[in-house]
């Protein structure tokens, strides 16, 4: 039964892509959205079936793929708790985003193409999480990169959007090169890239092995690009150029979590590479705080959410570096719920304001958008870590394990959490409270989104509220069911161990909640009671405020260090090597041919006696040559 179900899970999204691609001129926009949504809903049902029927690891062999000498790479799927979890998240959240898109993209003339791209994206993501070896995983990895390029630059008539798509594509290729080199080195070291061969072979290697450390570092580079960590994070905020459902799909449940999934899948390798794990801790923690600080002064509603995604991914990396792989996957799951809800809620606000994105031009929308307001509040509380919403449980679990490793990690992680709480409630208050600050035309247009858009918001709000109970902590009498479920798939170091005394954990929880509530109160005082509105673009900013507002000038720094020298080198290579050397060589052959042709042409003078004279001398020359030889 499992054999029959598994291969059909990625097949349906691929079928949806084919139908919507070839039928885009004859299928209506709404029908295209319905077909695309159905092609994701069916795999969701199959994934639930696997969830209830598979408790360990099952390999589904489809066909023999690559066989060269001792190398044998079959096309197989690995069905286990980790892959099933990702299947449920990808298809579940992906289905809701597809349904939402029917209303959001209903008026776009290229909606059919949009839904085809969405289905193709889901297909590659499912291939990524279901693959039983690193090569199939890499195919899905590259596929979602391609689809993200197509979706980010979907409105291709805008040059700025095309540049954002190109930036995402190029920066991901940098990370992908590291990933590919890691796979090649793995093939040399273990003779295989199949999980069932590599992981047992790695289990016999001593901790700190140089080869394993290099492999994990190379794989980590790929994860840094795909999951937008320092230094390869700058593509993700620019990816907001795509339609809002694309932002929800990329930043919530799918593409950006691919790096987290890959490291969790390779947990056996990373548990044997303490140096790599330490690097991941530093990068994750730095990214969490750095990105959160940038979010404090952003005024584009989608840019704020983008930097919050980068920050939350940093917490997931922190958990991975600490060896708390189940905690990272738990936060992946809860983050998918509340971040998809935040993006779709932002899309609902933009839909009501004729695509306005500047929060300084919003305000007072809670009465006109009641469903969006309530669901957005739930998501904001969840990402801020307020109990009993889902983000509280997953983030607290990561911070508790950080404290157990080193209390200073908890302090730095808590600073990032405070930043997150402040900028999210800054966003929430500026959008939904105070007086409306937009144009009179926008105010006349403001209305709640249609049911096809609000129903996904309500479902995600329920998941964002209840999602934390999937791994209800033992300190409250829970069984930590999520961690236990993932146990057969992960090599976590925390199973069966009490990290810190319950009294200490309760004290950490209480102190963090009190501080977060104080931050929410401060944000209320500033943005609601005082009615403070961020300054416009013409206002001069100085010192640290200017630095943070301009995102620490990282894009400008990259432009100066990498982009401009590369462009300069390209121009010089083109103007000298390409045009002078290469074109000179090619053109010289042409000129020589012309000169020779002109010279030989003089021999063709039409005089028969001259031809007989030349023929006679040619015969004499041949005779002499033969005599000499």
Image (tube, helix red, strand yellow):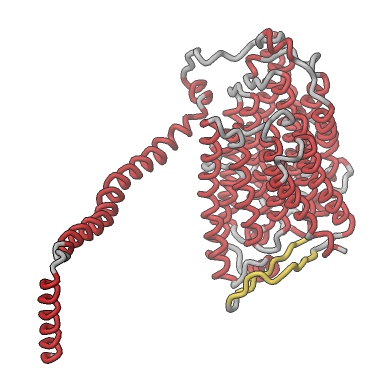
Q: Residue furthest front?
A: 608
Q: In this picture, is 87 found above or below 301?
A: below
Q: Is residue 158 visible from the viewing direction of this image?
A: yes
Residue toward you, 617 or 233: 617
Question: What is the x, y in percent for residue 506?
Answer: 79, 36
Q: Is residue 503 visible from the viewing direction of this image?
A: no
Residue toward you, 491 or 333: 333
Name the quadrant containing residue 31: top right
Question: What is the x, y in percent for residue 534?
Answer: 60, 15
Tell whether 592 sits left or right of 345. left
Tell whether 505 sits left or right of 438. right
Tell whether 4 sits left or right of 26. right
Task: Pick the quarter of the image with the C terminus.
Answer: bottom left
Question: What is the x, y in percent for residue 91?
Answer: 78, 46
Q: Residue at x 20, y 61 (%)?
A: 597
Q: In this picture, is 315 found above or below 135?
A: above
Q: In this picture, is 117 found above or below 300?
A: below
Q: Residue at x 70, y 18 (%)?
A: 353
Residue toward you, 478 or 363: 363
Task: Pick the quarter of the image with the N terminus.
Answer: bottom right
Q: Residue at x 79, y 35 (%)?
A: 30
Question: What is the x, y in percent for residue 361?
Answer: 64, 14
Residue toward you, 441 or 552: 441
Q: Residue at x 69, y 66 (%)?
A: 75
Name the quadrant containing residue 403: top right
């Amino acid at each position: 039964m499992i054999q029959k179900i598994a291969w059909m899970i990625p097949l349906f999204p691929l079928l949806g892509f084919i139908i919507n691609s070839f039928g885009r001129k004859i299928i209506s926009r709404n029908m295209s959205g319905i077909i695309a949504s159905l092609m994701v809903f069916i795999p969701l049902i199959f994934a639930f079936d696997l969830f209830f029927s598979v408790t360990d690891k099952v390999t589904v062999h489809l066909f023999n793929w690559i066989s060269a000498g001792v190398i044998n790479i079959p096309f197989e799927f690995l069905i286990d708790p980790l892959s099933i979890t990702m299947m449920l998240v990808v298809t579940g959240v992906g289905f809701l985003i597809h349904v939402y898109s029917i209303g959001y993209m209903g008026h776009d003339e290229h909606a059919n193409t949009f839904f085809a791209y969405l289905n193709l994206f889901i297909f590659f993501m499912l291939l990524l999480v279901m693959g039983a070896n690193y090569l199939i995983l890499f195919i899905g990895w590259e596929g979602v990169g391609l689809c993200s390029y197509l979706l980010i630059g979907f409105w291709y008539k805008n040059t700025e959007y095309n540049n954002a798509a190109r930036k995402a594509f190029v920066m991901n290729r940098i990370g992908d090169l590291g990933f590919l080199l890691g796979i090649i080195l793995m093939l040399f070291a273990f003779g295989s890239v199949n999980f069932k061969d590599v992981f047992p072979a790695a289990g016999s290697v001593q901790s700190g092995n140089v080869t394993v450390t290099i492999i994990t570092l190379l794989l980590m580079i790929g994860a840094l690009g795909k999951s937008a960590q320092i230094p390869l994070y700058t593509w993700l905020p620019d990816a907001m150029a795509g339609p809002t459902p694309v932002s929800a799909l990329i930043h919530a449940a799918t593409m950006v979590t691919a790096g987290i999934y890959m490291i969790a899948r390779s947990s056996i390798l990373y548990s044997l590479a303490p140096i790599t794990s330490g690097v991941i801790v530093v990068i994750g923690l730095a990214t969490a705080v750095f990105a959160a600080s940038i979010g404090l002064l952003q005024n584009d509603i989608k840019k704020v959410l983008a930097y919050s995604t980068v920050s939350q991914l940093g917490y997931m990396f922190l958990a991975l570096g600490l060896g708390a792989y189940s905690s990272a996957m738990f936060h992946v799951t809860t983050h998918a719920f509340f971040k998809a809800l935040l993006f779709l809620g932002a899309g609902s606000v933009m839909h009501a304001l004729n695509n306005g994105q500047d929060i300084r031009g919003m305000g007072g929308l809670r009465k006109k958008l009641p469903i969006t307001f309530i669901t957005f509040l739930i998501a904001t509380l969840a990402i801020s870590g307020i109990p009993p919403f889902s983000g509280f449980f997953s983030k607290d679990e990561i911070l508790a394990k950080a404290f157990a490793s080193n209390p200073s990690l908890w302090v730095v992680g808590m600073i990032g959490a405070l930043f997150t709480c402040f900028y999210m409630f800054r966003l929430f208050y500026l959008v939904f409270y105070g007086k409306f600050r937009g144009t009179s035309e926008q105010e006349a247009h403001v209305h709640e989104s249609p049911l096809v858009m609000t129903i996904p918001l309500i479902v995600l709000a329920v998941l964002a509220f209840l999602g934390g109970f999937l791994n209800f902590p033992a300190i409250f009498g829970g069984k930590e069911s999520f961690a236990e479920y993932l146990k057969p798939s992960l090599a976590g170091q925390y199973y069966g161990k009490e990290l810190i005394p319950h009294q200490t954990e309760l004290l950490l929880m209480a102190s963090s909640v009190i501080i977060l509530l104080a931050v929410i109160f401060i944000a209320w005082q500033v943005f609601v009671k005082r009615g403070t509105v961020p300054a416009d673009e013409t206002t001069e900013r100085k010192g640290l405020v200017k630095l943070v507002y301009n995102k620490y000038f990282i894009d400008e720094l990259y432009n100066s260090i990498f982009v401009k020298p590369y462009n300069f080198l390209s121009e010089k290579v083109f103007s000298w090597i390409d045009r002078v050397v290469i074109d000179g060589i090619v053109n010289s052959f042409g000129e020589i041919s012309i000169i020779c042709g002109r010279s030989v042409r003089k021999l063709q003078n039409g005089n028969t006696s001259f031809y007989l004279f030349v023929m006679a001398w040619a015969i004499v020359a041949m005779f002499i040559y033969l005599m000499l030889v």
